[in-house]
Image: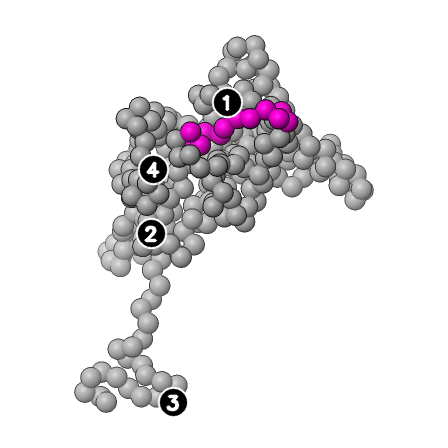
């Protein structure tokens, strides 16, 4: 069978039937509307959220999102498929097609984890997880202690839980008081608030202090945390939940002979 480029071996066919190499990917981050990464953000969002999920934002919402995207405190993450062509003499790989995006937005005491999207043709390569891990590397770095927080519909909760996020119970805000989370009024789908907490009291304590300080400034009218309608209800809910986690972590540390100092 040499005429068609195939060779029979004891283990099967080799040559033309060899599987192609799996593609490789790189994650690049930038702030605000910095190029070149910014130009790749909106096309992927439109393909995933508008084309795939049927989410059709209003002109006002698009304008608000674009303004948020351009803030210096907003960090964008873009996944690129590595190009087959290496840069001559550099030993590095050129960026190819942009296939996934996400963003972090510093809002009051929170790092908002938002707009996580991967093109349908590139799902199954673990790219959503790579975006989440890249954002965690950023939020775990030096700087003001901000709590990673996000909103997710019921279908996506399990994905985020695999990366350390916990659902904040709604009744932690005020039992019996109904309210909606952002996006529910737009998508008509139930959403949940999730936060990612450290595992030790030593690491949780600065987050609690920052949340409490923000709540004080909000109550005094000197700071507006976010622009969603139910934020004043959302902040106390998260504070109570994080304080309970701090108390639990402190008890664990003391039970193991450690300290919460």
SS for dot 4: loop
Residue designated by label 1: 230
233 and 248: which one is in front? 233
Which percent across, then down, holds residue 103? 40, 36
View extreme (left): residue: 3
Indicate which disc, 4 or 2, sits on the residue closer to the N terminus: 4
SS for dot 1: loop
Indicate which disc, 4 or 3, sits on the residue closer to the N terminus: 3
Which percent across, then down, holds residue 146? 54, 30
Q: Rate crowding at label 2 as few (under 14), some (14 to 19) or many (20 or more) other CA atoms within 10 Å.
A: few
Magenta stretch: give its range: 174-185
Indicate which disc, 4 or 1, sits on the residue closer to the N terminus: 4
Q: CA distance from mark 4 to mark 3?
A: 54 Å
> Is 224 rendered above or below residue 134?
above
Residue designated by label 2: 120
Residue 224 located left or right of residue 41: right
Residue designated by label 3: 10
Label of residue 217 in the image = none
Q: Is residue 207 visible?
A: no
């Amino acid at each position: 069978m040499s005429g068609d480029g195939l060779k029979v071996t004891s283990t099967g066919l080799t040559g033309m039937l060899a599987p192609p190499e799996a593609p490789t990917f790189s994650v690049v981050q930038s702030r605000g509307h910095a190029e070149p990464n910014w130009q790749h953000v909106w096309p992927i969002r439109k393909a995933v959220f508008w084309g795939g999920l049927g989410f059709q934002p209003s002109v006002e919402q698009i304008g608000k999102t674009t303004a948020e995207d351009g803030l210096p405190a907003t960090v964008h993450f873009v996944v690129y498929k590595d190009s087959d062509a290496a840069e001559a003499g550099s030993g590095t790989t050129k960026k190819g097609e942009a296939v996934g995006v996400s963003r972090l937005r510093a809002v009051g005491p929170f790092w908002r984890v938002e707009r996580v999207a991967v093109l349908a043709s590139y799902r199954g390569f673990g790219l959503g997880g790579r975006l989440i891990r890249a954002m965690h590397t950023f939020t775990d770095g030096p700087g003001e202690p901000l709590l990673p927080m996000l909103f997710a519909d019921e279908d996506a909760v399990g994905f985020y839980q695999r990366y350390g996020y916990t659902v904040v119970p709604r009744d932690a805000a005020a039992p019996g008081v109904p309210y909606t989370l952002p996006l529910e009024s737009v998508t008509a789908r139930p959403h949940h608030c999730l936060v990612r907490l450290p595992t030790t009291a030593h690491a949780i304590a600065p987050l609690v202090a920052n949340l409490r300080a923000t709540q004080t400034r909000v109550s005094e009218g000197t700071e507006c945390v976010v622009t969603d309608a139910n934020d004043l209800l959302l902040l106390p809910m998260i504070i109570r939940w994080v304080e309970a986690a701090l108390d639990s972590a402190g008890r664990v540390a003391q039970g193991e002979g450690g300290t919460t100092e």
